[in-house]
Image (cartoon, rainbow, N blue to C red):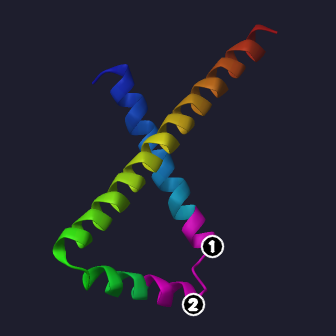
Amino acid sequence: MTEQELLDMFIQERINMLIDIFHKNHPDKSMKKKEQILQAEIFIDNLPDKEKNLIKNYIDSLINQLALEERFLYQHGFMDGVKILKYIDKL
């Protein structure tokens, strides 16, 4: 396992832990939100196949892009923290 793969694994596990904590501390209390999501899913499911696939591909692409950006930001934030610790250690 390379150093980058180890770092990626560590970051992904930490992100998963933080997401679990977030969802425990912020339960979805809004029935209105759940209803809106259900209505959107029904609407998408009733679209013709071409439009349904276009919407689903767009949503998947958007989610993947956001996940890549979050991972990038977290990784660089982690590395910034390591640099700060090294700098403090030199003081």
Residue 3 numbered tag: none
77 or 39: nearer the viewer: 39
Residue at the spot of label 1: 26
Instruction: Name which residue lies at 57% across and 71% down.
Output: 24
Q: Could you classify mark 2 by the number of other residues whose Cα lies within 10 Å: few (under 14), some (14-19), or many (20 or more)?
A: few
Q: Quadrant of the C terminus?
A: top right
Where are the magenta residues, as a range? 22-37
Kind of residue at badge 1:
His
Nearer to us of marks 2 and 1 is 2
> What's the residue at 68%, 15% (across, down)?
86
- Residue 31 falls left or right of residue 5: right
Residue at numbered disc 2: 32
**Residue 48's image quarter?**
bottom left
Q: Nearer the viewer, residue 49 or 9?
A: 49
Q: Position of residue 7 (x, y in %)?
A: 43, 30
**At 22% from the left edge and 66% from the top edge, which residue is drawn?**
53
Q: Is residue 64 left or right of residue 19?
A: left
Pointer 2 or 1: first along the chain: 1
- Give, as a three-letter code, the residue at label 2: Lys
Residue 2 at x, y percent in the picture: 31, 21
Picture quadrant where residue 4 is located? top left
Q: Secondary structure at mark 2?
A: helix
Q: Is 48 above or below relative to 56?
A: below
Magenta span includes 19 = no
Looking at the rendered image, the quarter that the N terminus falls into is top left
Element on which disc 1 rests: loop
Classified by dominant secondary structure, the portion drawn in magenta counts as helix
Horizontally, is 68 left or right of 70 in the view? left
